Image (tube, rainbow, N blue to C red):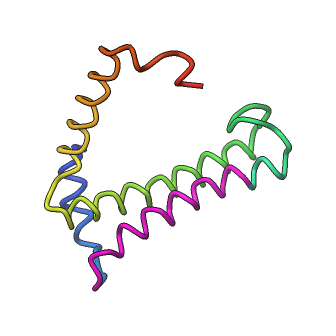
Amino acid sequence: MHLNDYQFKAEMYAEYKDPMYPFFGLAEEAGETLGVIAKSLRKRGVSGISGEVKGDMMNYVETKLSDELGDVLWMLSACCAELGITLQDIAEMNLTKLQIRQDAGAISDEDRR
């Protein structure tokens, strides 16, 4: 599926009155994503998402993270719609920005850790 196709279909589920709702919702969903990771770290005492996780627990964490990341995507899509831009626009602008940073030597292995 293409980003703009997703955005068009996702708009069918947009039922809110305040145009600021998706912006606040985006932060909330990002927090819920981090909450999944925090809870899994607390329960297992490991670092990293997949560090020492095995079997069913890893499947659970991956499923919960996928679910929350889907909510993040929906909220991002709604934010874009409120601004009159598309997810495709955002993706292309971001790749351009990343290329500029890489060309300037501003992206290194240390930045990825």
Task: Pinpoint residue 89: horizontal percent, then vertical percent.
Answer: 17, 44
With respect to residue 102, does 71 lie above or below?
Answer: below
| Farthest bottom residue in view | 17
Q: Is residue 33 magenta?
A: yes
Instruction: Residue 6: name its quadrant.
Output: bottom left
Please give the count of numbered marks on the rendered protein. Answer: 0
Instruction: Residue 1: name its quadrant.
Output: top left
* SS majority, magenta: helix
With respect to residue 89, does 16 lie above or below?
Answer: below
Q: Is residue 36 magenta?
A: yes
Task: Pinpoint residue 72: horizontal percent, then vertical percent.
Answer: 43, 57
Q: Is residue 72 left or right of residue 48?
A: left
Q: What residue span does the magenta drawing correspond to? A: 17-38
Q: Residue at x 18, y 60 (%)?
A: 8
Task: Pinpoint residue 77: horizontal percent, then vertical percent.
Answer: 29, 58
With respect to residue 14, does 75 lie above or below?
Answer: above
Q: Is residue 113 left or right of residue 25?
A: right
Q: Residue at x 23, y 29 (%)?
A: 96
Which quadrant is home to the C terminus? top right
Closer to the camera in the image, 88 or 56: 88
Task: Pinpoint residue 73: horizontal percent, then vertical percent.
Answer: 38, 55
Q: Residue at x 66, y 48 (%)?
A: 61
Q: Residue at x 32, y 27 (%)?
A: 98
| Farthest left residue in view | 84
Q: Is residue 4 left or right of residue 73?
A: left
